[in-house]
Image (cartoon, helix red, strand yellow):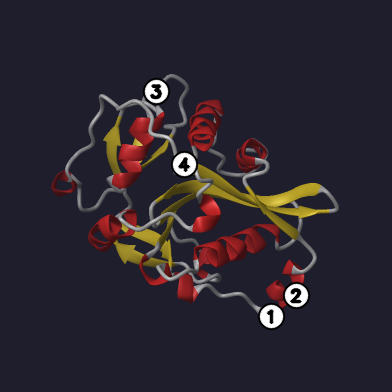
Amino acid sequence: MPLLPPPTSWSFPDRRRFDALDDLVGIGADLEPATLLLAYRSGLFPMPSGSPGDPMYWFCPVQRGVLPLAGFRASRSLRRSARTFETRVDTAFEQVVRACGDPSRPHGWIDEDIVGAYTRLHELGWAHSVETWRDGELVGGLYGLAIGGLFAGESMFHTATDASKVALMRLVELLSDEHAEDRLIDVQWRTDHLASLGIVEIPRADYLDRLPGALALPLPAALDDGR
């Protein structure tokens, strides 16, 4: 089981106080492990404001992007492509985060504070990477938090065609156990690219209603290192 960090002194707003039209629901707090865990258990996730020195922004989208495990769409060509990669779990976590935060990527938001915060969560057993490798080189992957039956996906990257899609396909396989129907893969926001893989939008209220049941589930065996 993951290791529990010291408790946080922060709290997050009650869902009844969320603005019904605004994805941004909080400003401030910190990125300590316990603060982040409380946020995800409350349905929130952080993103930097974009201005150095400004407080952290916390989001709970009005329309949440989620991936039903049974709804993942893997085309025949993607399955063929997957055979050209090796997939691994948690062998290059910080590399994956840094690749996701490559400053040359458009709309980048992963800064050193984010890298440090999620690496600390990884060291405690809460954050995980699913990686795609080819000829010994890391060419794609994703990372996120696993809390019970919730996998809160943060970002993904690829430097080879289909590498990030293969990482997502592998994640779906890892979570597809006897609890698969109640597990929750959160991708924050739906995009057209993600929609092509089966990601759908659900209202904020539905997401928050489903969250406690997902959190109560056991971790998938592949993401539980037995600590």
Residue located at (66% from left, 63% from top): 166
Q: CA distance from mark 4 to mark 2?
A: 32 Å
N-terminal of the two: label 1 or label 4? 1
Q: Residue furthest top?
A: 53
Question: 218 or 144: nearer the eye?
Answer: 218
Tell me the residue that label 1 is attached to.
76
Tell me the residue that label 4 is attached to.
126
Helix, strand or loop status at disc 4: loop
Q: Amino acid at mark 2?
A: Arg
Q: In the image, 64: left or right of 20?
A: right
Tell me the residue that label 2 is attached to.
80
Q: Position of residue 74 (x, y in %)?
A: 61, 75
Q: CA distance from mark 1 to mark 3?
A: 46 Å
The residue carrying pointer 3 sits among few (fewer than 14), some (14 to 19) or many (20 or more) residues within 10 Å by Cα, namely few
Q: Amino acid at mark 4?
A: Trp
Q: Are marks 1 and 3 in contact (CB under 8 Å)?
A: no
Helix, strand or loop status at disc 2: helix
Q: Are marks 2 and 3 in contact (CB under 8 Å)?
A: no
Helix, strand or loop status at disc 1: helix
Residue located at (30% from left, 27% from top): 7
